[in-house]
Amino acid sequence: MLRRSAASLLPRLLQQQGGAGAAPLAAAFQHQLPSFGAGDDKPGAAAFRAYSSTTSELAAAQAAGLTPTTYAMKNPTSTISYDTSNHEPFPVGDPSKRAFTYMVLTGGRFVGAAAVRLAVLKFLLSMTATKDVLAMANLEVDLSNIEPGQTVTVKWRGKPVFIRHRTEADIAAANEVDISKLRDPQPDSARVKDPNWLIVVGVCTHLGCVPLNNAGDYHAWFCPCHGSHYDSSGRIRKGPAPYNLEVPDYCFIEDGKVIVGSNSA
């Protein structure tokens, strides 16, 4: 026990002594512990030989005017001595350890990548509209059965939509209006793609009521809840409503049909 304690204190004493005084100190230590000779295989002998070999480096550090730590950092060496008096280290790159390590690392990375992929997919799918929502996004309506002067109401995205087959008189009345006198100024040409057809959302812009078809002072739409009157272009003319009836996205397709909710065929 005493020999091991002395061996552990030796490097500290050598560092404190430093330089030329390191060799006499090591010699004195070896004289006091003769069992640490070159041929001794008792515990602590290998440690003493390794520590004794540092005396030349300590002298070199003193000659360079540096502390032993600074000198060691500026002059690294690949020669390393280990005290194997009380244990036997495993060889570097032990195959039994390496295979297990690689297996654990690879498995962990695979599980982590799979978890990230699953989280991304779930996030993207949560942002995608469901089938019932997609089915309500667009509404196809056959216009061939709507007579001139007739207005039909269809349901699109939970809201009523008015589709009016306008007569020549309706078109003329919509174009004769002085736009500067309108509460929500819009020309009729900006609200229709085909003058014969007017398509608007059937919700009053005042408080969300549903106006009556072919009613009011302009023979188009009238909201009985608060007395708003709309003309044949769906523009507010009288009453408290602040805006014209909304025009949804729509496009005409072949065979006399229209798709509400789409800008292109």
Image: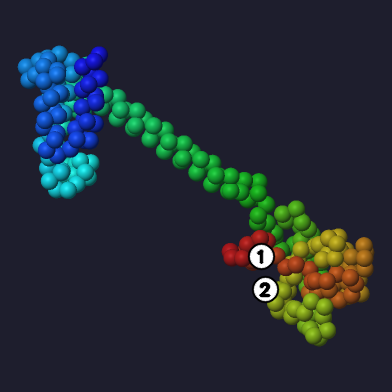
Q: Position of residue 152 (x, y in %)?
A: 79, 62
Asked whether the beta carbons under mark 1 and mark 2 sit within 8 Å of each other, the answer is yes
Is 209 displayed left or right of 77 in the figure? Answer: right
Q: Secondary structure at mark 2?
A: loop
The residue located at (51%, 40%) in the rendering is 119
Query: Between marks 1 and 2, how big is the CA–CA gap?
Result: 9 Å
Identify residue for label 2. Answer: 193
Please, what is the three-letter code of the amino acid marked with disc 1? Tyr
Dividing the picture into quarters, in which one does residue 93 lie?
top left
The circle on residue 213 is none
Q: Position of residue 218 (x, y in %)?
A: 88, 75
Q: In the rendered image of this protein, does residue 162 appear above or below residue 107? A: below
Closer to the N terminus: mark 1 or mark 2? Answer: 2
Q: Identify the amino acid type marked 2.
A: Lys
Residue at 61% across / 65% down in the picture? 263
Label 1, secondary structure: give it. Answer: strand
Judged from this view, the residue extending furthest toward the left is: 39
85 shown above or below 128: above
Q: Residue at x 42, y 33 (%)?
A: 111
- Quadrant of the image occupied by residue 11: top left
Residue at image location 16% in from the left, 32% down from the top: 80
Read off the residue under disc 1: 250
